[in-house]
Image (cartoon, grey):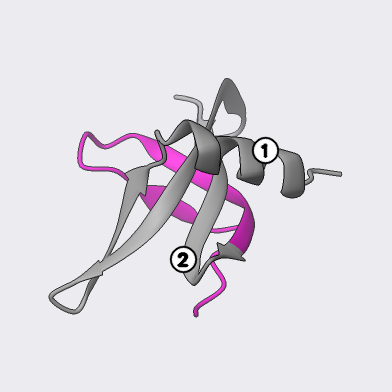
Amino acid sequence: MENLTNQVIYLDDDTKYFIIRQALYKGVTYYLAAEVADDEESFTNNFKFFERKDEDGKFLVEEVTDEQVLTVLANNIKVE
């Protein structure tokens, strides 16, 4: 598992997210990320959890929407 903490990822809609934390839960990699502001120097107040997906040798992320998984991640991934 490649560590993407402190890296920027780009979504299909060109939105950029900065990976704050990375965690492994039940064999799946998750990321806590902050949206990068238009000035590219700061963050918006938009934070999301993403799940890593590997398809056809490509690395993709998908926003976590499962309430149970979100609860576990929010309770266990701490930002200091």
- Which residue, given by chain and number where applicable, does mark 1 sit on? 74
Q: Residue at x 40, y 39 (%)?
A: 16
- Percent from the top left, x then y, of residue 61? 33, 53
Foreground of the two, 8 or 72: 72
Does the rendering let one see residue 17? yes
Q: Is residue 5 visible?
A: no
Task: Identify the residue at image location x=79%, y=43%.
Answer: 79
Question: Please, what is the three-letter code of the amino acid marked with disc 1?
Answer: Ala
Give residue 21's mark. Answer: none
Which type of secondary structure does the marked residue at label 2 adopt? Answer: strand
The answer to whether 35 is drawn above or below residue 64 in the figure is above
Whether residue 18 appears in magenta in the rendering, the answer is yes
Q: Earlier in the sequence, mark 2 or mark 1?
A: 2
Q: Residues within 10 Å of mark 2 (few under 14, many from 20)?
A: few
Q: Is residue 17 above or below residue 60?
A: above
- In this image, 52 relative to 53: left or right? right
Rendered location of residue 12, percent (x, y)? 20, 42
